[in-house]
Image: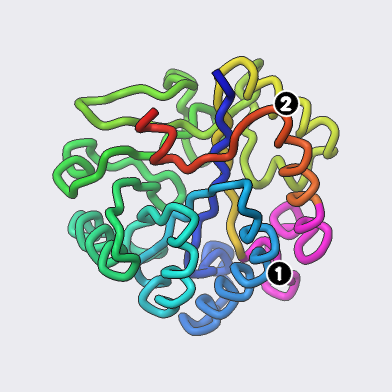
Amino acid sequence: MIPKILLSFDVEEFDMPLEYGRAISPDEQMQVGKAGLDKLMPILRDSTIQTTFFTTANFANHYPDAIQSLAQHHEIASHTFYHSSYATEDLKNSRERLSQITKQEVVGLRMPRMKQVPVADIIQAGYTYDASIHPTYLPGRYNNLHLPTKLYSEDGLFRVPASVSTFCRIPLFWLSFKNFPYSLYLKLALHSLQKEGFLSLYFHPWEFVDIHSYGLPSYTTKGCQSILFDRLNQFIHDLKPHGEFISYHAFVKS
């Protein structure tokens, strides 16, 4: 069976400066997020790959045409309604609003910052799968070393974990991609792909534009703009011989 590569982007308001006490207006948060999405378009037009965009309904309300266009080839899934706040009703409201905009069924969820919410709430809101599981240990965030690294079902809800290394469960997420030596990251990703049969990765469009002026830690801004874009383009090229790029929904259905 051909290994599956699940490439995803969390399409959201660029509210990260707020975590570090830096003021940024809602309009500017949107503008930075949209600029990043525009920057990625040359990669996203590649007809040989399909990706998933976990999108806040708030972002989609501001840029419905862009989300509709992406939905023609890629999967649009929910990143709840707002990135900086959450209420249980946001699960259903975001799914329904994204469905209205894309005119397609929205069945997937990823919570902002991998926040854990009751499975019953996710099911009640009408989702088929949840991609909010990160089976690793991140100091100050979470300790999920007890969770599976493969696709699993919980109370009838499919849960797709983010990928980790085959030893020590080193997270293969956006920070690793930009901070590890490329050859090491590629090696870890290929090992995980071969062992698990799939690779689940996530990035943010705002990573691909210049965000140096927001006072963020250097490990979050490393390579922003052209360096990170070129690295992602190379990474996709290097992965293609080893698997098939499909959406999360297609993976769950298979």
Q: Which residue is mark 2?
A: 188
Q: Along the line of sight, which residue is nearer the eye, 193 or 224? A: 193
- Is 253 above or below relative to 55? above
On the image, the x and y values in percent for residue 144 come to 46, 27
Q: Which residues are magenta?
A: 206-230
Q: What amino acid is at disc 1?
A: Val
Count of numbered tags: 2
- Is 195 above or below relative to 155? above
**Earlier-in-chain disc, 2 versus 1:** 2
The part of the image, by quadrant, that contains residue 146 is: top left
Real-space Cα distance between discs 2 and 1?
A: 26 Å
User: What is the image's colouring?
Assistant: rainbow
* Residue at horizontal 36 percent and vertical 72 percent from the top: 58
* Residue at horizontal 66 percent and vertical 16 percent from the top: 167
Q: Along the line of sight, which residue is nearer the eye, 63 or 14? A: 63
In what element is the residue under mark 1? loop
Q: Quadrant of the C terminus?
A: top left
- Residue 55 located left or right of residue 225: left
Q: Residue furthest front?
A: 47
Q: Along the line of sight, which residue is nearer the eye, 192 or 141? A: 192
On the image, the x and y values in percent for residue 41 come to 64, 66
Q: Main secondary structure of the magenta part?
A: helix
In what element is the residue under mark 2? helix
Near mark 1 (Cα within 10 A), the count class, few <14, some 14-19 or many ≥20, is: many
Instruction: Determine if the magenta segment contains residue 216.
Output: yes
- Is 205 above or below relative to 131? below
* Residue at horizontal 18 percent and vertical 49 percent from the top: 125
Q: What amino acid is at disc 2?
A: Leu
Near mark 2 (Cα within 10 A), the count class, few <14, some 14-19 or many ≥20, is: some
Q: Which residue is mark 1?
A: 209
Q: Quadrant of the N terminus?
A: top right
